[in-house]
Image (spheres, rainbow, N blue to C red):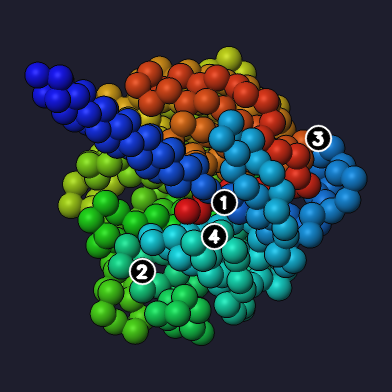
Amino acid sequence: MNRNKKTVHSRLATNITMALSLAVFSLAGSAMANAAVHHQTALIGTWTSIPDAPSEQKPDHPSEGLYRMKVNSDGTLTPLDVIKMKSPSWIVKSRDGRFAYTTNEESGGAVTALSVDKSGQVRVLNIVDSHGQQPTHATISPDGKFLFVSNYSVAKGGAGVSVFPIHHDGKLGEQVQHFPFEHGTGAVEGRQDGGHAHSTTFTHDGKYLYAADLGGDKLHAYRYHPDKAQPLEADSTRDVNFTAGSGPRHMVFAPNGKHAYVITEMAGEIVVFTVNQDRLEPAAHIKLNTENNSAEYRSGGGIILSPNGKYVIAANRGSDNKLLVFNIEADGMLGKPMRYKANGIEPRAFSFDGSGKYLYVTNVFTNNISLFHFDENTGEMKAAGDAAKIPTPTDIKFFN
C-alpha cells in the first residue's frame, strides 16, 4: 500500500514537472514570438538641404541622408546610423521587404536601390539617373518587375514618369520608358506653369497605373503590360480631369477596389471616385478644412489606408497641420472625419509600423517624427509625443 502511494506521488511529481516545463517552454516561445514582432527597423527619408520657408524651424545641422532607427517596444525610435546620400525624400519597399528604393529629390534627380537584410542592415546596390528633376515618389508594380518614378520638377522640362526594370538582385536597370508632363493649367501662378508628376498608383487589379499630375490638374491613365520591355501604354480615354487649380497629389484605392480617394494639394480636398472597369467617376468632394477656406489652410498632403483597410488617413498642411481619420462606409463613401493636431509643421508623410498600433508622422519644418497610438476598432488616435527628432524628415517606412 505504501509502495503504491509512493508510486502515485512520484508520477504526480513527474507530471507536474513536465507541465511546468511545457508552460515555461510555451512562455519562452511566446516571448520570442513577441520579440520577433517588435524587431523592426525604421528608415527615415529626409531633405538634405534646409528649405527656405517662413515656418521652417532651422535644425542644428542639415540632414546627412537616409536614417536607420531601431523601433522600441513603446514606439519610440533610437538612432542606429545614417546612409549618406542627397535628399532621399521618398522610400518604397519591395513586397518581401528585402529591397528598398529612394527618390533623391535634387535638381539632378536620382534613384537609389538598397538591400535590407533580416537584421535591418542596409546596403546600397546601385544608383540610376531619374531622367528628370526633383523625383518625389516611386511605386513598384504588383509583380515586382518595374519601378515607376515621379519627377516633380520645379523647372519646365524636368517633370514626368520614368520606368525602370528591377533585376532579381534588387538592382535597377536603365530607364526603359519616359512620359514627360509638359503642360500645366496655369490656374495657380507659380505652381502650375508646367506639369508636375507627384505620384503613381496601381488599380486594385494591377491592370492600370494612374499618375497624378499636380500641375496639369489631371490623372494620366496607363495600361500595364507586365511582359513587355516597355510596360506602360497611355490610355487617354481613362484620364481624369480635375477642376483647375486643384492639384491632385496622392491617391489610394479601397481594399475592394470599388472606390478611389485622391487628395488635392491646392484645393485641399479628397475627391472620392467610384471605379467601374478601372474607369474613375467622381462621386464626392470632401473639404479637409470646413472652417477656414483661405489658401493658407488648403494644403493637402499624404493619404493612406489603415492596415485593416477600414479607414482613410489624410493630412492637411499649411496653417492647419492636422491629421484626419475617415471611416470608409459600406457604400465606399467617407464618414465625418476625426481631426487631430499633427504635433508638428508640414506633416508630409506618415506610416504605420508592422504591428499597426503606431502611426508615425514626419513633420518636415519642425524636424520631428510625431507618434500616435491607433485604435483599429474605432479609428481613434492618441498622441504619444515625439518618436524621434531628426532634421527635415520627409518619409518613414518599416522593415522586418
Q: Is residue 390 visible?
A: yes
Pointer 1: what residue? 41
The answer to whether marks 2 and 4 mark residues whose Cβ atoms lie closer than 8 Å is no
Q: Is residue 334 above or below residue 87?
A: above
Q: Is residue 306 left or right of residue 362?
A: left
Pointer 3: what residue? 55
Pointer 2: what residue? 144
Tell me which residue sits at (62%, 24%) in the image.
384
Q: Secondary structure at mark 1?
A: strand
Name the amino acid type tagged 2: Gly
Q: Secondary structure at mark 4?
A: loop
The answer to whether marks 2 and 1 mark residues whose Cβ atoms lie closer than 8 Å is no
Name which of mark 2 and mark 1 comes first in the sequence.
Answer: 1
| Residue 250: image tag | none
Rate crowding at label 4 as few (under 14), some (14 to 19) or many (20 or more) other CA atoms within 10 Å: few
Q: Position of residue 66 (x, y in %)?
A: 68, 59
Closer to viewer: mark 2 or mark 1:
1
Name the amino acid type tagged 4: Ser
Pointer 4: what residue? 119
Tell me which residue sits at (27%, 24%) in the image.
329
Name which of mark 3 and mark 2 comes first in the sequence.
Answer: 3
Q: Is residue 180 above or below residue 92?
A: below
Closer to viewer: mark 4 or mark 1:
4
Label 4 – label 1 distance at C-alpha: 8 Å
